[in-house]
Image: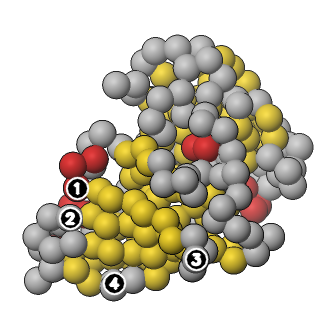
Amino acid sequence: QVQLQESGPGLVKPSGTLSLTCAVSGGSISSSNWWSWVRQPPGKGLEWIGEIYHSGSTNYNPSLKSRVTISVDKSKNQFSLKLSSVTAADTAVYYCARGGSSAVAGSILGHWGQGTLVTVSS
Amino acid sequence: AIRITQSPSSLSASTGDRVTITCRASQGISSYLAWYQQKPGKAPKLLIYAASTLQSGVPSRFSGSGSGTDFTLTISCLQSEDFATYYCQQYYSYPLFGGGTKVEIK
């Protein structure tokens, strides 16, 4: 059973860069799956940030695209998120998730990490 | 951009009730819709994809229907463990979630 675990700083200063890593265990990041990041501001709904395939192909939410970079490290079986120029509005629980294997099913998120709270504050 | 409207935003129900939640897309999305359940402090859990396909391990009291622009999640006989927030998600274009429906105990 695949497991995902997010890690990274819980506090980021405004205008800085949020950096998170998702470690994958019980499965290979090089499997035929897409790997996503989703966030949830406190008390609010879910927002898809973007996804990556092990080849390095990415898709991003248009509203965040200018600030987001998702990358994959096959040697460490993990993928990462960088979100630049953060503000208080980026305060949220950040989840990593595994999607399906096709271009469309890649966004069906069947396995999730537990999530990590990132607060943007000085 | 495709917009997703989920309703109601909250509802109160009793154990044993039949509950229906709807999602409407601003344009046709075929059957590219999924439903998730989220409990407080936990990650979302996939219940249904392709509008009506039950994810492995999900109880059969959950069902989904619809295609095009109108979709429904039905819980046929509400159990205590079903009190949670439910989200729909379209994946016809870049993934977009509905605003959520909180199912509370009456």
Q: Which of marks 2 and 4 is in front?
A: 2
Choose between A33 and B33: the one closer to the eye.
A33
Which residue is drawn at the image coordinates 31% and 67% (left, top)? A82
Q: Disc 1, disc 4: CB below 8 Å? A: no
Q: In which quarter of the image is residue B65?
A: top right
State whether residue B10 is above or below residue A41.
above
State whether residue A78 is above or below residue A56.
below
B23 left or right of A101?
A: left
Amino acid at dot 1: Arg
Cα distance in 3D space between marks 2 and 3: 25 Å
Whichever of labels 2 and 3 marks the residue nearer the N terminus, that label is 3
Residues at marks 2 and 3, common chain? yes
Q: Residue A84 carries which label?
A: 2
Whichever of labels 1 and 4 marks the residue nearer the N terminus, that label is 4
B19 left or right of A70?
A: right
Whichever of labels 1 and 2 marks the residue nearer the N terminus, that label is 1
Image coords of residue A92 (percent x, y): 34, 67
Which residue is drawn at the image coordinates 46% and 15% (left, top)? B27
Image coords of residue B53 (percent x, y): 80, 35
Q: Mark 3 belongs to which subunit?
A: A
Cα distance in 3D space between marks 1 and 3: 26 Å
Q: Is mark 2 on a helix, strand or loop?
A: loop
The residue that mark 1 highlights is: A67
The residue that mark 3 highlights is: A75
Choose between A121 and B38: the one closer to the eye.
A121
Image coords of residue A35 (percent x, y): 56, 57
